[in-house]
Amino acid sequence: MLLLAYLALPHKAQAVSPPPDGGYAGGNTAEGQNALFSLTSGGYNTAVGFFSLRANTTSSFNTALGAGTLLANTANEITAVGAGALLSNTTGPFNTATGAFALLSNTTGSDNTALGSAALESNTTGMQNTAVGSATLVGNTGSYNTAVGYTALFLNSTGSPNSAFGWGALKANTTGNYNTALGYAALYGNTTGTLNTATGDGALFSNTEGGSNTADGTDALYGNTTGNDDTGIGFEALFSNTSGSENTAIGHQALHSNTEGFFNTAIGSNALQNTTGDSNTAIGSGTLTNSTSSFNTGLGSGAGYNVTTADKRHLYRQYGGKREQHVFYQQHS
């Protein structure tokens, strides 16, 4: 009862002593040389650090923590944490930068998020980009890109919209569009290739200009550079492919050695593993594994396994422990 009576009594308001400095009219807070130096009517801004929010006059709800953060800003609702973060921003709204020199060059770009040292450092007018990780999207000037992982989309300039998740994913991309890379160094060397999807460490690692490729699996389509419309699913599927196009490989090391061959289909572990020809179809584990010729078809596990340079237009089948060979057309020299 005594405690309740004590709480009911009026008490003098308490405050920290000495009172904190840096508080100004309009809910503004400024600490540091020339922080919020130009403020006139803007409200609820926080500037901590040398020259932070120095040019801000009427804008509100900005937070700048670090030397030079939001130095030139005149926009609203911007958050910058780290020396030089969003230093050049003028009218670009709704940007968030955390990390030294994150979004350093941004001027009018909007709705960008940069988390990490130098993330989106060169972006000027690009919008709706997300960069998480040191040096992610560091050269970007495009829009609608997402990069998560150290140096992901590092060299991207105007390419849009690309998504990169993992260390070095799409690192060399400059103007390629609509690419998706998920995994360590996935699509690492891509520069101008478009419409590629790489899932797995090293998938489409060497691709530069090839387009509309799909690689799913560690090192799938690893060596591809300019080949188009290829699909590799499985560990090292189409591993050696460079310029071959319209190939489909599904299975561990399927079409592993193909470099320039076209129109091949391999389904099954090691199917068409060593082929370098064109227009072959192999369905089954180990089917036509050692064939290097063209226009052959193998159906069943191990069918045509020992075939190497047979004449064209052959069908190899294996079922019930039996092997068959049919010649549809034999080409003579």
Image (cartoon, rainbow, N blue to C red):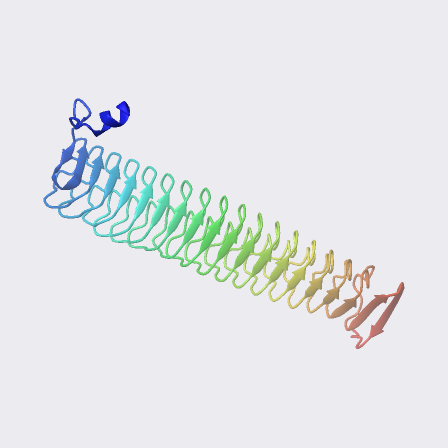
Residue 53 in sight: yes
Q: Nearer the viewer, residue 84 or 15?
A: 15
Identity of the residue drawn at 68% across and 55% down? 256
**Front residue (pair 215, 82):** 82
Q: Residue furthest left?
A: 40
Judged left or right of residue 84, residue 13 is: left
Q: Residue at x 53, y 58 (%)?
A: 197
Q: Quadrant of residue 114?
A: top left
Percent of width and height locating residue 37: 13, 38
Spot occupied by residue 8 in the image (x, y as percentages of width and height): 21, 29
Residue 250 position, x and y percent, is 67, 60
Residue 15 vertical placement versus 59 (above, below): above
Does residue 103 appear to the left or right of 149 in the view shown? left
Q: Quadrant of the C terminus?
A: bottom right
Residue 153 can be seen, yes or no: no
Q: Is residue 77 above or below residue 242?
A: above
Q: Quadrant of residue 329?
A: bottom right
Q: Residue furthest bottom?
A: 329
The image quadrant where one finds the N terminus is: top left
What is the number of callouts on the image?
A: 0
Q: In which quarter of the view is residue 72 placed?
A: top left
Q: Position of residue 301 (x, y in %)?
A: 80, 61
Q: Residue 331 versus residue 37: which sits nearer the camera?
A: 37
At x 80%, y 64%, the residue is 300
